[in-house]
Image: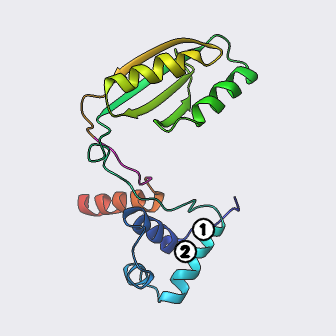
């Protein structure tokens, strides 16, 4: 990824695209006070530099029948490079694993898994996860309710402008 120096307009573009990646360039340009051509050039620069890595469509898990969301803590027998690689390669192949993090603390990995039902979760754990070489302990916690879920990153310019407004109000 190339190093890029962000200005206020770049931050505005990124914030708007995080809200709606299908926003037509003309509307995006209007929202960030640019003409369409320079706006498109900035978006292309952000894409080419790797700041914008891809565009996706977010689906409602419940609407497509994925009603069970589970956080799984996995401990390995040894936290050595070959064991980590084996585990990470195995997990990367599984579509029900939405996120996987190498952790500090009691567990080596934290997974977020989404499946249609408890039986599917059981099959995933027993038939797949427990059979990955080096896995020594698996602990699952069911998510009862999703309180907050977002995909937009907290961009620095947004936070800075919020704190400036708060300071102005307190004067």
- Position of residue 16 relative to residue 137, above or below, is below
- Tell me if label 1 and label 2 are in contact, CB under 8 Å: yes
Q: Secondary structure at mark 1?
A: helix
Q: Residue 58 placed where, x, y %?
A: 38, 54
Q: Residue 43 placed where, x, y %?
A: 55, 74
Task: Provide the residue designation for mark 2.
Answer: 43
Residue sitting nearer the eye, 143 or 6:
143
The alpha-carbon separation of the residues under discs 1 and 2 comes to 6 Å
Task: Provide the residue designation for mark 1.
Answer: 47
User: In the drawing, does residue 80 fall left or right of residue 76?
Assistant: right
Residue sitting nearer the eye, 143 or 36:
143
Q: Secondary structure at mark 2?
A: helix
Q: Main secondary structure of the magenta part?
A: loop
The region drawn magenta spans: 148-153
The outermost residue toward the right is: 82
Q: Residue 113 placed where, x, y %?
A: 43, 32
Image quarter of residue 152: bottom left
- Position of residue 31 relative to residue 164, above or below, is below
Q: Residue 107 placed where, x, y %?
A: 53, 17
Image quarter of residue 45: bottom right
Residue sitting at x 25%, y 58%: 170
Instruction: Give the position of the C terminus as an image quadrant.
Output: bottom left
- Position of residue 16 relative to residue 119, above or below, is below
Residue sitting at x 24%, y 61%: 169
- Position of residue 101 relative to residue 12, above or below, is above
Q: Is residue 37 magenta?
A: no
Residue sitting at x 46%, y 85%: 34
Residue sitting at x 71%, y 62%: 2
Residue sitting nearer the eye, 40 or 158:
40
């Amino acid at each position: 990824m190339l190093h890029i120096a962000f200005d206020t307009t770049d931050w505005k573009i990124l914030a708007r695209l995080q809200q709606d990646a299908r926003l037509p360039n003309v509307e995006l340009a209007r929202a960030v006070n640019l003409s369409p051509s320079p706006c498109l050039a900035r978006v292309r620069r952000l894409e080419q530099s790797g700041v914008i890595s891809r565009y996706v469509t977010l689906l409602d898990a419940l609407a497509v029948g994925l009603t069970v969301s589970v956080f799984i803590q996995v401990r390995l027998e040894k936290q050595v490079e070959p064991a980590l690689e084996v585990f990470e390669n195995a997990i990367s192949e599984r579509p029900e694993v939405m996120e996987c993090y190498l952790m500090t603390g009691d567990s080596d990995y934290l997974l977020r898994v989404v499946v249609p039902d408890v039986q599917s979760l059981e099959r995933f754990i027993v038939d797949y996860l427990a059979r990955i070489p080096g896995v020594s302990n698996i602990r699952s916690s069911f998510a009862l309710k999703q309180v907050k879920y977002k995909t937009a990153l907290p961009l620095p310019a947004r936070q800075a402008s919020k704190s400036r407004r708060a300071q102005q109000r307190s004067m």
